[in-house]
Each structure stands twice: as structure tokens, then as C-alpha cells.
Image (cartoon, rainbow, N blue to C red):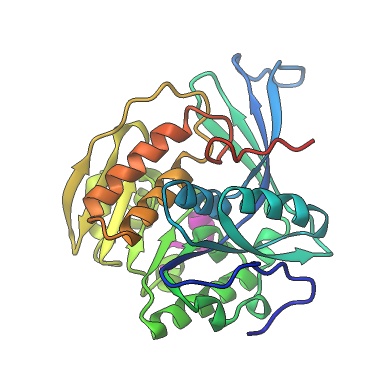
Amino acid sequence: MRTAAGREEPAEPRTAGALLVVGDVATDVVARHTEPITYGTDTAAEIRTLPGGAGANAACWAAYSGCADVRLLGRVGAGGAEWHGTLLRNSGVRPTLIPDEEAPTATIVALVDAKAERTFLTDSGAALRLCPADWSAGLLEGVAALHLSGYLFFSEPSRELAGLALADALERGVPVSVDPASAGFIAALGVDRFLRETAGAAVLLPNADEARTLTGLPDPADAAAELSRHAPLAVVTLGAGGALVAESGAVTARVAPVPAAAVDSTGAGDAFTGAFLAALLSGASPVAAASAGCRAGAHAVTVHGGRPPGGEGTRP
């Protein structure tokens, strides 16, 4: 298996039935403010620096949800590799982190208002500098499912790596899931190109805004049905509204939401993704897996940051 100089490899031997996540690892600066932001002056806020990234968060929630072997491939700034690697291992994830000497770890400023809604300011940093040299088909040894963070498709080098990973997985018969990640970035890249780049994926996991962007259809149910013609299974998350499951061109289930007292919605979609994939990998039906995802998403909004309880790892 090819390796990159300085790569952090999983310490334990690999076992069958693993979930491999390829995606972004980030440092989140979460600012919770109870009053509206006042432009041009101060607004009081509670600010914490936490580990994040859609790919890393999803991996941690998959492990938290019972998946015994979760692996993660990502790229981080060299200075943050030890901190992020330690926290991922503490969360039950076996990371392969590529230290980048030229770019810092991706950083996301999450502005969380009194309703727990978040707005992101994103510096992708090292995360989207993953490149074909960082990939090896050997990473799929013992892997039963591959998950690709949609953020990979919004940069040339990481998009090329995602294409290689997708092709190698399909050649080996490993099902692939994709979280489209960002309606804004999809629009900038182009819907047709995003759908072309993700062709062959077995599962799409967009939120309602991403589903609308990808299809041009205003109704999330119509959008879910349309996306399930692109991939056999499309599961659209609706936030506090639950989720829609669509298969082969039709919505087959509406999964009820799980009530929660929300304090921070950062990472709720990642929690859904991780729990959904863990359940699906264990043999659950798509509907049961979506129910597990909704429970995890409801849990996620009751904690600060995007990681499961006990794995938030506030940076000193």
C-alpha cells in the first residue's frame, strides 16, 4: 500500500466489515450568541474551539452508534495532526491523517443563534488538499462500506481522489454513500457536474436545501424521489421534521422526528449520517437506519459542537 511521508497509520490490524470515511477534518470555532449580531461593534457570545469536519464528525457518530470498525482518511495541518488524531482515536475512530506542511487544518467559524440555528464561515485549508497520492486501493481492505464527504467534490485535487476512491470501491463491490454537504458549494460547482462526479453511489444523504438544489424541485419529497433515480437510495433530512426515504424513484417512508431541546445544531446532519451508516452496515433496513439517524441527530443538537458526548475535546 502506498503511504505518504509522515502519514499517521491506524495502529491495529484491520478487520472485516469496516466503514471507511473519506472526508474533511476541521477545527470548529463555535460562537453561541443569544442576541442578534450587531454589525460594526461587539456582540456577547460563548466561544469554544472544538474538533469538527463533516467527515470526521460522521465517523465519530458511526463509532458512537455501535460500528466497531470505523476508519477515516483526511488531511490536516501538520500542527494539528496530533490533537485531531488523539481525539478521533478517543472517539473510537482509526484515523489515517495526512499532515500538510503548507496549509493549516480546515477551520470553520459556526455562528449559533438563540434558536440553535448555525451559519458557517469556512476556510477549507488542508482538508480539500487531499489528492490522488493520498489514496490507495489498499485502504479498502476489509471495508464493507465507503462514505465520501461531499466537500471532497468542491476542489480539484480532492475531487480527483474521490473519483479514484469511488471507482476502486465499485470495482470491489463496496457500496458508496455520499453526503452532498453544501447547497452553496453545489451551486458554485454546478449540479450536473456534481451528479456526474457522484454517479455510481448507492446512497445519497442530502438535507432538504441540498436536495432542492440538486433537483430544482421545491418540495423535498419530490426532490427525494428524483434523487433516488440518480442513486438507488436517497435519504433527505428535514431537520426538526424528520427524514424522507426514497428508493428507485419513489418516496417509500417518512420518518418521524425525535423531539429535542436544541442548544446547537452544528453537526446534527453528520450525526444522522454516522448513525444511519452504522445501522445500515449492521443490516438494518433503510427506514430503520433513518430512524437511528433521526435519534442521533436529536441527540446531537443537545450538545455543543459536532461530536458525540465525551468526544468534543475542547482545545486548550
Q: Position of residue 222 (x, y in %)?
A: 22, 50
Q: Position of residue 146 (x, y in %)?
A: 45, 68
In front of the other: 81 or 30: 81
Image quarter hosting the C terminus: top right
Q: Position of residue 124 (x, y in %)?
A: 68, 54
Q: Residue at 40% across / 64% down in the picture?
A: 177
Relative to residue 215, is residue 20 drawn left or right?
A: right
For the question of whether residue 182 can be seen, the reply is no
Location of residue 160 with respect to 292 vertically, above or below: below
Q: What segment carries the magenta color?
A: 185-192
In front of the other: 65 or 154: 65
Q: Is residue 75 magenta?
A: no
For the question of whether residue 105 can be seen, the reply is yes
- When asked about the image quadrant of residue 52, the answer is top right
- In the current view of this chain or complex, which residue is farthest to the front? 12
In front of the other: 36 or 10: 10
Relative to residue 37, is residue 149 drawn left or right?
A: left
Q: Residue at 57% across / 71% down in the picture?
A: 159
Chief SS of the magenta region: helix
Number of residue marks: 0
- When asked about the image quadrant of residue 103, the answer is bottom right
Image quarter hosting the N terminus: bottom right
Q: Position of residue 112 (x, y in %)?
A: 58, 27
Location of residue 45 with respect to 111 vertically, above or below: above
